Image: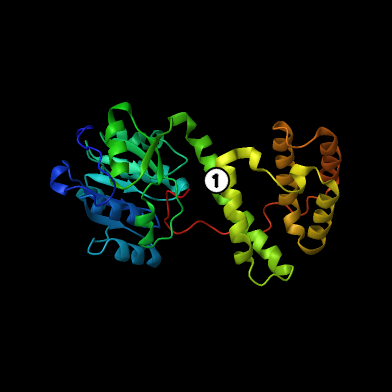
Amino acid sequence: MNAHAHQPAHGPGHGRAEDRPARLDVGVVGTGRVGPALASALRLAGHRPVAASGVSDASRRRAAALLPGVPLMDPTEVLSHADLVLLTVPDDALPDLVTGLADTGAIRAGQLIAHTSGRYGTGVLEPALRAGALPLALHPVMTFTGTPVDVQRLAGCSFGVTAPEELRLAAEALVIEMGGEPEWIAEEARPLYHAALAIGANHLVTLVAQSMELLRASGVEAPDRMLGPLLGAALDNSLRSGDAALTGPVARGDAGTVAAHIAELRKHAPHAVSGYVAMARTTADRALTHGLLKPGLAEDLLDVLADADPGPGPGNGDGDGPDDDEGGRS
């Protein structure tokens, strides 16, 4: 495919398909939550999903819901049918998958091979590049549900894009056709970029879930309704103002309140102490740096945090494994 064959559209379904050249046959390897949604968005832009592969019953149901009529087959067969292949598998599975596909000769010269991992750039696709493929890293910065609503949520979604310079226009055009906004990420910056997203999104879910758990323990019947306005305002303020939006006992230097929090958590939820202390220290450091926390008050606060028992740490057996064959999560 010519790297300049795609011309930017204005999101899924906009413009006449006949006015946009180079319609592609699209294959999906890994029908977790991400792949079917992206392929469905590409279908709205005039491309043709033609094949997919999935392992679990859940992934097959997702494919049936989002890609009706698209046959499921072995990954090597998917590649034999597709001009553009979306590799939407977990990060840790991606290197072996690419190597295996290259070793079997499944990859064709001129074929677009795109993965949706946030962690990797195009370096992980080196075996495909040696086989003559055109490598793209297109990471949608969104959490996916595995339902049709994901296709609508792609409108305005940022994508972390990494590709060789000669494929930059093609990569950006594909993102725009899916309704997204391309953001160029240098190859060497991909791990830091992904760590930043994990701190912001994945850790947020953990914090909110823990907050709701503790509110229930304190007798609140509808913690989600209580937290909704508070967290919505906090998110909006932090996106607008950054560290200037910091509030609460740590930013104020209220060491007595923080000590009381830690004592209650140690009594009722010891598993939450280490996270509270770690976030309080980070918050105090940022508040000090930005002049929100007075040095004199900070000293007492940091003494309280230094004396806190961190409680049980990671590895307590509460974690879940990865989803079946999901890739491209934020």
Does 258 appear above or below 111?
Answer: below
Q: Which of 38 and 299 lies nearest the eye of the viewer? A: 299
Q: Position of residue 38 (x, y in %)?
A: 33, 52
Q: Residue furthest left?
A: 18
Q: Give the secondary structure at mark 1.
A: helix
Q: Which of 271 and 155 lies nearest the eye of the viewer? A: 155
Q: Position of residue 122 (x, y in %)?
A: 38, 35
Q: In which quarter of the view is residue 224 placed?
A: bottom right
Does 114 appear above or below 271?
Answer: above
Whether residue 60 appears in this view of the structure is yes
Whether residue 318 appears in this view of the structure is no
Q: Amino acid at mark 1?
A: Ala
What's the coloring here? rainbow
x 23%, y 60%: residue: 70
Q: Position of residue 25 (x, y in %)?
A: 20, 49
- Side (left or right) of 20 relative to 90: left
- Side (left or right) of 147 relative to 212: left
Q: Which of 161 and 125 lies nearest the eye of the viewer? A: 161
Q: Position of residue 142 (x, y in %)?
A: 45, 50
Residue denoted by label 1:
198
Label 1 CA crowd tier, 10 Å (few <14, some 14–19, many 20+): some
x 32%, y 27%: residue: 165
Quadrant location of the N terminus in the rendered image: top left
Q: In which quarter of the view is residue 37 placed?
A: bottom left
x 39%, y 45%: residue: 116
Does 80 appear above or below 223?
Answer: above
Q: How many marks?
A: 1
